[in-house]
Image (cartoon, rainbow, N blue to C red):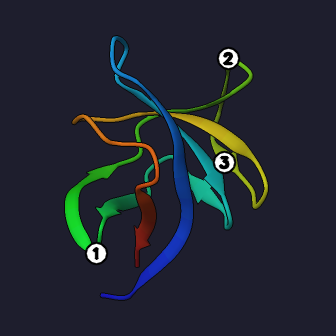
């Protein structure tokens, strides 16, 4: 399986479990992603919801800043990869 870097976590809201991700590539609901920090895999998950400006969307593109519900805590600066 190839991994494609698609973005970076720029903020994490711990109370609601949402990561804010700046995208460098397209991301869609249903994609499987992996978070990597310091060269080590943190966790994988399937994208279940995306939001831009508090509006639910099905797909986001390069340059978008999206809110992404995450299953575990993640730190700012973590890289986000789509698992192909």
At horizontal 33% and vertical 11% (from top left) the residue drawn is: 15
Say which mark, if any, is on residue 59.
Answer: 3
Q: Label 3 near label 2: C-beta < 8 Å?
A: no
Say which mark, if any, is on residue 54.
Answer: 2
Where is residue 29? Give x, y as percent. 51, 46
Query: Closer to us: mark 3 or mark 1?
Result: 1
Q: Between disc 2 and disc 3, whose residue precedes?
A: 2
Residue 26 falls left or right of residue 71: right
Q: Residue pushed farthest right?
A: 63
Quadrant of residue 70 within the rendered picture: top left
Quadrant of residue 31 within the rendered picture: bottom left
Q: Measure the alpha-carbon separation of dots 2 and 3.
A: 14 Å
Q: Between disc 3 and disc 1, whose residue precedes?
A: 1
Where is residue 73? Give x, y as percent. 25, 34
Secondary structure beneath label 2: loop
Total marks in image: 3
Where is residue 64? Give x, y as percent. 76, 48
Quadrant in the picture for the N terminus? bottom left
Quadrant in the picture for the C terminus? bottom left
At horizontal 63% and vertical 41% (from top left) the residue drawn is: 58
Residue 61 falls left or right of residue 72: right
Q: Between disc 2 and disc 1, whose residue precedes?
A: 1
Instruction: Identify the residue under disc 1.
Output: 39
């Amino acid at each position: 399986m190839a991994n494609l870097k698609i973005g970076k976590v720029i903020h994490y809201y711990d109370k609601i479990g949402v990561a804010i991700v700046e995208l460098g590539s397209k991301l869609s609901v249903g994609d499987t992603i992996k978070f990597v920090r310091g060269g080590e895999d943190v966790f994988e998950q399937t994208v279940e919801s995306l939001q831009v400006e508090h509006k639910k969307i099905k797909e986001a593109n390069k340059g978008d800043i999206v809110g992404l519900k995450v299953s575990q805590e993640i730190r700012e600066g973590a890289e986000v990869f789509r698992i192909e």
